Image (cartoon, rainbow, N blue to C red):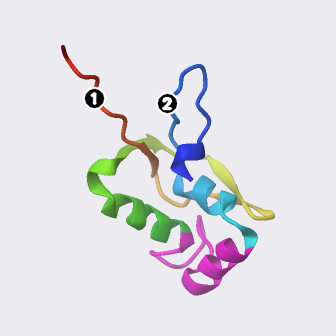
Amino acid sequence: MLANAAKGKGPVPQFLTSFQILNRLPAATREWLITEYGRPGEGAKTHFAAANVIAASLKKLGGEVDVMYFDARGVSFDVGDEQVRFGYQLCGLYRLRQAEPEIA
């Protein structure tokens, strides 16, 4: 999923949130995660919802994924047919780590 992120003007895939990844999964997989772990976002009434499962999985990849955070207050995401407001102040951004250029 991270390899298919928009590349912009360069060849490097850019960052995605766990909400975007959840939304881009096949519908059956997305719905299974939501059923199993709960709806993500503000008012989910759970600390570890479907988008958190994705974020935790990405963090386990360690050095293979770059992680940054942005201020997500007032931001919403599409998840399936719903628009979900982010429920915390910071939201993780994930992308495949880029190889360091070799120095000759």
Mark 2 sits on what residue? Answer: 12
Q: Amino acid at mark 1?
A: Glu
Report the front residue among 27 and 19: 27
Q: Secondary structure at mark 1?
A: loop
Instruction: Check residue 97 for magenta coloring.
Output: no
Q: Which mark is residue 22?
A: none
The residue positioned 66% from the left and 75% from the top of the image is 29
Q: Residues within 10 Å of mark 1 (few under 14, many from 20)?
A: few
Q: CA distance from mark 1 to mark 2?
A: 12 Å
Give the magenta part as a residue range.
28-50
Q: Secondary structure at mark 2?
A: loop
N-term mark: 1 or 2: 2
The residue positioned 49% from the left and 30% from the top of the image is 12
* Residue 23 drawn at (x, y percent): 67, 60
Instruction: Check residue 32 for magenta coloring.
Output: yes
The residue positioned 28% from the left and 23% from the top of the image is 101
Which of the 4 quarters of the picture holds residue 95? Answer: top left
* Residue 73 drawn at (x, y percent): 54, 47
Which of the 4 quarters of the picture holds residue 8? Answer: top right
Q: Amino acid at mark 2?
A: Val
Report the front residue among 81 and 54: 54
The residue lying furthest to the bottom in this view is: 36
Q: Is residue 51 left or right of residue 60?
A: right
Q: Which mark is residue 100?
A: 1
* Residue 28 drawn at (x, y percent): 72, 76
Q: How many marks?
A: 2
* Residue 13 drawn at (x, y percent): 52, 36
Q: Quadrant of the C terminus?
A: top left
